[in-house]
Image (spheres, rainbow, N blue to C red):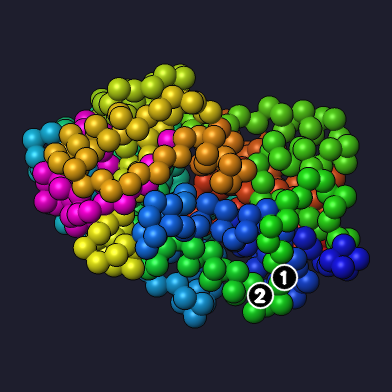
Amino acid sequence: MIKSREYDAVVIGTGPNGLAAAITLAQAGKSVIVFEANPTVGGGVRSAELTLPGFIHDVCSAVYPLAVGSPFFRTLPLHEHGVEWIQPPAPLAHPLDDGTAVLLQRSVEETASGLGKDAGAYEELFGWLADCWNGLDRDILAPPHRPQHPLWLMRFGYSAIQPAHRLAIHRFRTVPARALFAGIAAHSMLPLGHWGTAAFCLVLGAAAHAFGWPLVRGGAQRLADALSAYLISLGGEIVLGRSIRSLEELPHSRAVLCDLTPRQVATIGGARFTPAYRQKLSRFRYGMGAYKIDWALSAPVPWKALECRRAATVHLGGTLEEIAASEQAAWHGQHASRPFVLVVQPSLFDSSRAPAGKHTLWGYCHVPNGTTTDMTEPIEKQIERFAPGFRDCILVRTVAPPAELERRNANLIGGDINGGAPDIRQLFLRPNRKLYSTSEKGVYLCSASTPPGGGVHGMCGHFAALRALRDIF
């Protein structure tokens, strides 16, 4: 019945970018249908009882600085559809081996006050950026274009284009400040010596000061469900449990938008694409993978540094040098004995995530793409290093190596959660110079493999839909 109907647009995939694309088209009065292979919407924005009944875990992403601050999502009435943001007292904690922790706080000044001799340097780097972020974000979270704020963007770009390791050494003198900067920059999933890695710290740091690093009450699924509900309120349709293997399976439409990575797009497009375009897609490079673990705990994580209890997100990597070594190893196909580990403790701030008195913990480290090496011991050893007695709190763990992440979400090729390596060659022109367009008129990419790249912000889908509206409608 669906095959026989005609739509203005078809979207493949209900990740945040697919839903953003569909909403943008529906807001323009276009008839839209979205197909999703999984039984639930969300892609990387989903929740499930991964360990024990009553323990709600986020399947992939968990903390949303770019979602709450997204120039597109901010325009949507998500609160009317069940989204409640939880802002922990501090966005981020980074413990050190001496039993202390440095905090990234909402206030630039409060963050700087915890950095001793580097207080002035931190305020100089982030103060103006936080003040200008609501505006500058529209230039940064966008494809190449004529900027609205060219002077701000030039000032940002001067620091952002630098390798994170170099900028941290140049700007900061103390171990805590350098470690804090390195941990945030490591979200790039690139070696910290790569050009452009400083941008990731500047963006996420500025977003923390401007909008926080919030959780969604009840789990990530609530965000995906809200986007879906809003789409349906606009007249959009969603079909779950329907895997699309070829464009020929789709109902007739004037535009098709694919919330997929280049590998899947090349497969479903097949001979509809020119050989030259298929070759360009084949040259797209995927990045490091993630090795994720979810824990059901009998008690909160027993951090040595009490400051860690104030933050939902905790970075475990010690010093700048240790974090840099971990990321360098994963990029070159090796496994660090002390991996940089990102953990999130949502149940400290959201009691709906676990039964009374119990807790959930979410964590991962970066690994070579597609690795089969078991990283459970190194990850838990890193947590135990900063929280002695952590293992005694574990009730159940569920391990998700790269292959399991890809099974849960086909876009996570080899465990790559960023939609492709965001190095300098693929940071601006993703997946190639055509950006959202393909060699087939009316077929577009709208995933994190297009600008502005990874992160839950919906901007890739929004801009792809705007391109389709301009080209086709």
Res 232 label: 2
Res 115 label: none
The three-letter code of the residue at mark 2 reads Ile
Q: Sort mark 2 into few (<14), some (14-19) or many (20+) by Cα contacts within 10 Å.
A: some
- Residue 110 image position (x, y, % from top left): 16, 56
The residue lying at 15 percent from left, 48 percent from top is 302
Q: Is residue 223 left or right of residue 10?
A: left
- Residue 102 image position (x, y, % from top left): 17, 45
**Which picture quadrant has residue 377?**
top left
Local secondary structure at mark 1? strand
Q: Find the magenta span and give its range.
A: 290-319
The residue lying at 72 percent from left, 33 percent from top is 281
Callout 2–callout 1 Cβ contact below 8 Å? yes
Q: Is residue 270 above or below residue 295?
A: above
Task: Report the front residue among 253 and 469.
Answer: 253
**Which picture quadrant has residue 282?**
top right
Which residue is identified by label 1? 237
Task: Report the front residue among 312 and 462.
Answer: 312
Q: Would residue 322 be counted in the magenta stretch?
A: no
The three-letter code of the residue at mark 1 reads Glu
Q: Is residue 153 left or right of residue 104?
A: right
**How far apart are labels 2 and 1 at the CA level?**
6 Å
Q: Sort mark 1 into few (<14), some (14-19) or many (20+) by Cα contacts within 10 Å.
A: some
